[in-house]
Image: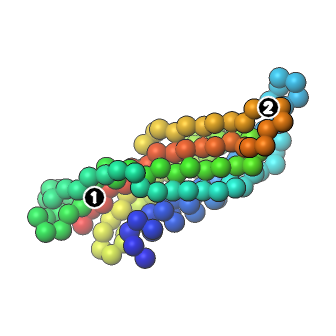
Amino acid sequence: MSLRTTIQNKVVELVESGTFPAVTYVGNTATDTGVLEAPKSIICNEISGGLTDKAKTGATAFKYSLTGWRFECVVDFSKEVDTSTFLLGELKNLNFNVDDMLVSITPTGDFNVTHPPRQGSHNGTKLTIGLTVNTRR
C-alpha cells in the first residue's frame, strides 16, 4: 500500500470510530439525543505539501522527506450531530511507520462545521478537518 493511501485509511479509521451524538430541537432548545450517528461518508485526500532534503528529517539530496503535507478530511452525516466530543477528546496525533519512514499526522487546529437548517432539512452536519503530515527517514 502506498504512503498516501495508508495515511487516508488511518484517518478514515479514526473518524469512523468517533463519537458523534445526534442533535434535535424542541423549539429553540438543542437536545443531545444520546443516539450516536455514524458518518454517511468520509473523504480524506491530500491538498498541498512540501519536500525537504534537510538532514534533520533524515532526508538526503537523493531521498526526500515530506513536510507540511496537508490533507483535508470531509465528513458528512445524514443528521445534525455534535462534533465537540470527537474534536476535543478523540481527534489525536497518529504516528506510525511505513517502509522505514516515520509518519506523523497532526490535526492542525483548523476545522469547519456546517449544520443543516432546522426545519425540513434533508442534509446533515458536514465536518471538514485540516491535517498536516510530516515524514522522517
Which x, y percent locates residue 89?
A: 59, 45
Q: Are marks 2 and 1 in contact (CB under 8 Å)?
A: no
Residue 30 falls left or right of residue 54: right
In the image as oriented, which residue stretches furthest toward the top? 28
Element type at mark 1: strand
Which x, y percent locates residue 32?
A: 79, 38
Q: How many marks?
A: 2
Q: Earlier in the sequence, mark 2 or mark 1?
A: 1
Q: What residue appears at the point 79 percent right and 38 percent down from the top-left corner? A: 121
Query: Residue 54: which quarter of the image?
Result: bottom left
Residue 105 appears in the rendering: no
Checking the image for residue 49, the label placed there is none
Q: What residue appears at the point 11 percent right and 64 percent down from the top-left corner? A: 61
Residue 50 appears in the rendering: yes
In front of the other: 54 or 80: 80
The residue type indicated by label 1 comes to Leu
The residue type indicated by label 2 comes to Arg
Residue 2 falls left or right of residue 120: left
Q: What residue appears at the point 52 percent right and 51 percent down from the top-left corner? A: 73
Quadrant (top left/top right/bottom left/bottom right) for the N terminus: bottom left
Q: Which residue is identified by label 2?
A: 118
Quadrant (top left/top right/bottom left/bottom right) for the C terminus: bottom left
Q: Which residue is identified by label 1?
A: 66
Q: What residue appears at the point 55 percent right and 37 percent down from the top-left corner? A: 112
Q: CA distance from mark 2 to mark 1?
A: 43 Å
Q: Residues within 10 Å of mark 1 (few under 14, many from 20)?
A: some
In the image as oriented, which residue stretches furthest toward the right? 26
Residue 5 falls left or right of residue 28: left
Which x, y percent locates residue 72?
A: 47, 50
Q: Is residue 57 above or below residue 32?
A: below
